[in-house]
Amino acid sequence: MQLFQNQQIKIYNSLSGKKEDFKPINDGYVGMYVCGPTVYSNVHLGNVRTFMSFDMVFRYLKHLGYKVRYVRNITDAGHLENDADVGEDRIAKKARLEEIEPMEVVQRYTVDFHNILNTFNFLPPSIEPTATGHIIEQIELIKTIIDNGFAYEVNGSVYFDVHKFDETNDYGKLSKRKLEDLIHNTRELDGQSDKKNPQDFALWKKAEPQHIMRWPSPWSDGFPGWHLECTAMSTKYLGEQFDIHGGGMDLKFPHHECEIAQNEAAKGKTPVNYWMHANMLIMNGKKMAKSTGNFILPTQIFSGENEHITKAFSPSVARFFMLQAHYRSILDFTNNGLLASEKGFNRLMDAVNDLDNLKASTTTSFDLMEWKQKCYDAMNDDFNSPILIANLFEAVKHINQVKEGTTTISSEDLIALKETMHTFVYDILGLKDTSNEGVGTDKLSSAVDLLIKLRQEARANKDFALSDKIRDELANVGIQLNDGKEGTSFTLN
Ligand SMILES: [Zn+2]
């Protein structure tokens, strides 16, 4: 018996605009696709929030006993600067500006992306495919769409015929747009003259002579359109129809709308049963943007080196802060919000640690099973992490009361409470107990400072053999002493 047989999840489906009972296509198995990053710059905190929402979904589905195949792609080609299929390829542009190979750009920012996600304690997806690794699948998909009459070639480029598609299908059903309105609101841009209509989108683009990222195809040496890779890779790894497709709200149109159109045009099937969209992250009530200075990098949260925050915050505190908002709500990133979350996080962790030292009685004076189901109910209700966290604080209250002796818990219930708290705090919310880290670092600092002092004394006594020994032995265990004008400091290697 798996937990999912007792716990019915409801998911807010962006396609229907309603919360629906989640029923996977194959009993016990879930296929989930999430649009990954375009790796041409450091990962944006807003993207971290989106991926964190789906990390939580992945964790919860796994906890319920589902066998989940979670596919999150890396876009390493084909994403142009402008949604209207004009402008430079983002990765090629960065490569040109930095005078390095496009694949060096891809490598650098893929590594950065993984480092940041590891720091935030993300689980890796089951498959992380790249666009450049699936050029053949994309070319095959284009051939099928052309054969089915929904795409046309002009001067070596291939475009999806949105008007033709809309005659038999419904273009705009996900983002609730009508083609007539789109026609009204589209301005003709330079470089679009190849298209029959401005609403059409590129499946294949012929590469300009100076464009470095190019592959041979039946139509031209060129590169795939951005929307195509997700259709090719989701079909390859999850099938023509799968359970959950996720991404940031900003991808709903045109990206996800185009994914649906490509699938329906190629296979005649609507690809996804549940579309999930994570909302935006803003900072201090305003859109985050490098150009306005209203901006913070994830690494600056951990170092505290940013004018918008007063101190450094641990990755778990930042994670806790983000999960205190529901994934479909806008999250406002503020220093005060982080400070409050840090207090809450410490209180939660103290209570979890206190569970090891609580004295059990013969009876329990609160309803443990009812509380536990409330935790599940919160997650079953469209992954409502803020309500779950509120329920966890109910338990914190009980733990503190048992500690003070004003209420009781039986030894059996104490084991169950500990197990449930660990499950929700560590496995599902993905938090890590960092409350001891600071203490550990402080102790290490004091110990190394003491050795630095002893080394200074040795040097003052001209005992250079001893002073060198202290320096070398510390280096051996990864502690580097740096002698400077202001004295000696140390770094951990
Ligand atoms: Zn995508």
Image: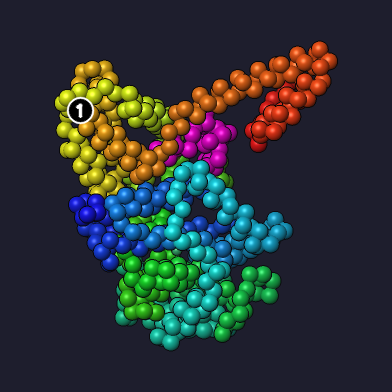
* Left or right: where 72 falls relative to 89: left
> Residue 179's image quarter?
bottom left
The picture places residue 87, in percent across and down from the top left corner, at 58, 66
Q: Is residue 170 visible?
A: yes
Vertical position of residue 336 compared to residue 103: above or below: above
By what rule are the colours in the image chosen? Answer: rainbow
Q: Secondary structure at mark 1?
A: loop
305 within the magenta span: yes
- Residue that appears at 22% across and 32% down: 412
Q: Which residues are magenta?
A: 294-320
- Residue that appears at 20% across and 42% down: 373
- Residue that appears at 35% across and 76% down: 264
Q: Indicate the quadrant containing the C terminus: top left, top right, bottom left or bottom right.
A: top right
* Identity, as a three-letter code, of the amino acid under mark 1: Ser
Residue 375 versus residue 246: which sits nearer the camera?
375
The picture places residue 383, in percent across and down from the top left corner, at 30, 48
The picture places residue 243, in percent across and down from the top left corner, at 32, 64
Residue 2 versus residue 85: which sits nearer the camera?
2
The outermost residue toward the right is: 462
Q: Residues within 10 Å of mark 1 (few under 14, many from 20)?
A: some
* Left or right: where 63 falls relative to 439: left
Vertical position of residue 471 compared to residue 291: above or below: above
The residue that label 1 is drawn on is 410
> Residue 92's image quarter?
bottom right
* Left or right: where 366 falls relative to 280: left
